[in-house]
Image (tube, rainbow, N blue to C red):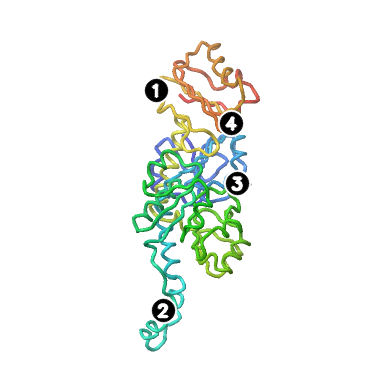
Amino acid sequence: MYKIATLNKISPVGLSRLTDDYTVIDNTDEANGILVRSQAMHDMEFGDSLLAIARAGAGVNNIPLDRCAQEGIVVFNTPGANANAVKELVLAGMVLAARNIPDALAWAKTLAGTEGVGKAVEKGKGQFAGTEIKGKTLGVIGLGAIGVLVANAAEKLGMDVIGYDPYLTVKAAHGLSNTAKIVDDLKDLYPHCDYITIHVPAVADTKGMINEDAFNKMKDGVVFLNYSRDTLINDDDLEKALAAGKVKKYVTDFTDDRVITFDNVIVLPHLGASSAEAEDNCASMAVDQIMDYIENGNITNSVNFPACNLGPIVPGSTRVCVIHKNVPSILGQITGIFADMGLNVENMINKSKGDYAYTLLELSGDVAEADLKSKLDDEAIISIRVIK
């Protein structure tokens, strides 16, 4: 029986996908797998039985990825599972900003108890007159699962779209409207856009990427939307851009103690993936990925190890999963051990990602995990698992 621990509230729809071979527990020390949403895990100690952590969402900044890799713990995320939910909120954010809806709602509430509310509304509504988004230009920074959906939806609403992504995948390119303009440099996006939305991961290279230099290149009165992470924005430079009118509105699903006090900021309480459908989708994908890894050794959508898949285990065969450092000669050592043991390798796949690699082998015979570990006693080997 495999043990799965949950952190945060995980959708029952996703948990229902666990088969009878699994039980859900509270104690992470005993877990073979952990399902998590946003709970911080950096200070957690992991038990020896932990094989994988699956994040029901895309962002993994709450998980110690390097330490997990060093300990042979595969970390999964669920890219695209909440993409539609975020897309809809981005569209809502543009309309909120364009039509001054938050300020209008707040003002309308102040009229409660006023005699002749209807006349007061007609007299005062002009101060909230806005613009339509049709015919405006939207810049999309990051054309992953969310960015592509936003770009396509914006075009259907009558907007022109300019996209930027130096790492545009073939899959994303195929899904993107062929009328969206793609640029190779942000300087070719900034000055042409009435709205700009950013959808990139929060990593060292993207921290503070939206700064004074970026704002200066943008069109005066731009509306900037951030549904990715607060760390992408330089707060000092944002405050200056808002005060100067360079940025007309800043719409964000992530904020901090300073930004929430700025004028002309629309702050949402991290609602991007907070739809019933998105939570179900993320949990279902997370559960499927962690079960496939535990039962078959396959890795899909891992952020710290390479994708590696041999499909379901062939009945009667043995599958060996080896997590190791990405160093020369180690693959030869692994395959050589099986030759020495008289075992035939029927199928094999080896993939690397940065400093780490993963080798998945299908054997026609049987092998004891303890015996294999003793023969592959090398500092480059992080973990060995035998699945039958």
Seen at 50% across and 38% down, the residue is 302
Q: Position of residue 280 (x, y in %)?
A: 40, 49
Tag shown at residue 314: 1
Q: Which residue is mark 2?
A: 126
Q: Position of residue 156 (x, y in %)?
A: 34, 55
Q: Quadrant of residue 353?
A: top right
Q: Which residue is mark 3?
A: 205
Marks 3 and 4 sit apart, C-alpha to C-alpha, by 21 Å
User: At numbered mark 1, what does the secondary structure look like: helix, strand or loop?
Assistant: loop
Say whether residue 229 is left or right of residue 173: right
Marks 4 and 2 sit apart, C-alpha to C-alpha, by 60 Å
Q: Which residue is mark 4?
A: 356
Q: Position of residue 277 (x, y in %)?
A: 38, 52
Lower sequence index among marks 4 and 2: 2
Closest to the camera, between mark 3 and mark 4, is 3
Q: Which residue is nearer to you in this view: 188 or 93?
A: 188
Give the amino acid at mark 2.
Gly
Closest to the camera, between mark 4 and mark 2, is 2
